[in-house]
Image: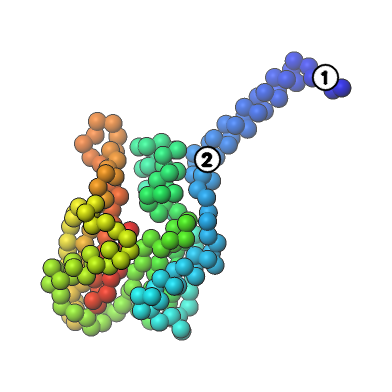
Amino acid sequence: MLKLSRSDLVLAILGVTGLAVVVALYQSAFPLALVEMEVTREEAVASATDFVEELGAELGDFRHAAIFSGDSEALTFLQRTVGDDEAGRWAREEVPVWRWDIRWFRPLDAEEWLAEVGVDGAVVAFRHIVEEAAAGADLDESAARARAEDFLRTQGWDLSQLDSVSASADRKDNRTDHLFIWKVRGTDIAWRPRNSHASSRACSASVTCSRWVASY
């Protein structure tokens, strides 16, 4: 039977303690380790493709690229304000800190489709880029807001839980684009103790060429 000396026991304890510290520091420095990845790259592309095609995208001759990315500034903010554990929960359930970015494009063509897919496989944002000179409707703010709100409803948003933050219009030669931003009630996070400033979860939707472009 192997017998350990007192010094061996001390070293073993220190080794286990050191491993625990390394694991804790790794999870703190790289919180992706706390987030369960539920979709592969291929699955994320398939989910995003289905989503934009349902919106009318014709991707037949478009190329696509996909990369995994994260919002380090948002993550740092969450870690410093709510702590590592709660930051991990927000990254999983509230905001798409980690995501797959998918882009469809054609060389030398300004038109693009972009989508972001969260770690659970849900599309959390998309955008349709068109030529500056592309023709579209000249909607007023009320009509454009109605279209944006209708789209959010189809995506499962409860508009009674959204507070309007801003609305803006961008007049082009052949159309007027609109951007609307809301914040989600009950998601305020103070920047630091006793500071009057706070951040919150937000969603935005714009109407470009009479189409929706949403970011959740």
Query: Which residue occupies 53% across, 66% down?
Result: 43
Image x and y of residue 34, in percent: 51, 44
Q: Earlier in the sequence, mark 2 or mark 1?
A: 1
Image x and y of residue 202, in percent: 28, 53
> Could you say whether the residue bearing mark 2 is in a helix, strand or loop?
helix
Query: Which residue occupies 41% across, 63% down?
Result: 123
Depth check: give the residue in front, 109 or 190.
190
Image-based side of 171 in relation to 20, left or right: left
Query: Which residue occupies 52% across, 56% down?
Result: 38
Question: Which amino acid, by three-letter code, is at mark 2?
Answer: Gln
Q: Quadrant of residue 77?
A: top left
For the N terminus, give its image quadrant: top right
In space, the residues marked 2 and 1 are separated at their CA atoms by: 35 Å
Residue found farthest to the top: 6
Can you say whether 91 is above or below 123 in the image? Answer: above
Depth check: give the residue in front, 86 or 110.
86
For the C terminus, give its image quadrant: bottom left
Judge the density around disc 1: few (<14), some (14-19), many (≥20) Cα neighbours within 10 Å. Answer: few
Can you say whether 164 is above or below 174 in the image? Answer: above
Label 2 with label 1: CB-CB less than 8 Å: no
Image x and y of residue 193, in percent: 28, 31
Q: Which residue is mark 1?
A: 3
Q: What label does residue 44 carry, if any?
A: none
Residue found farthest to the right: 1
Image x and y of residue 53, in percent: 40, 76
Question: Which amino acid, by three-letter code, is at mark 1?
Answer: Lys
Is residue 66 visible in the rendered image? The answer is no
Q: Which residue is mark 2?
A: 27
Query: Which residue occupies 45% across, 54% down?
Result: 98
Q: Quadrant of residue 172?
A: bottom left
Depth check: give the residue in front, 108 or 58.
58
Q: Tally the marks.
A: 2
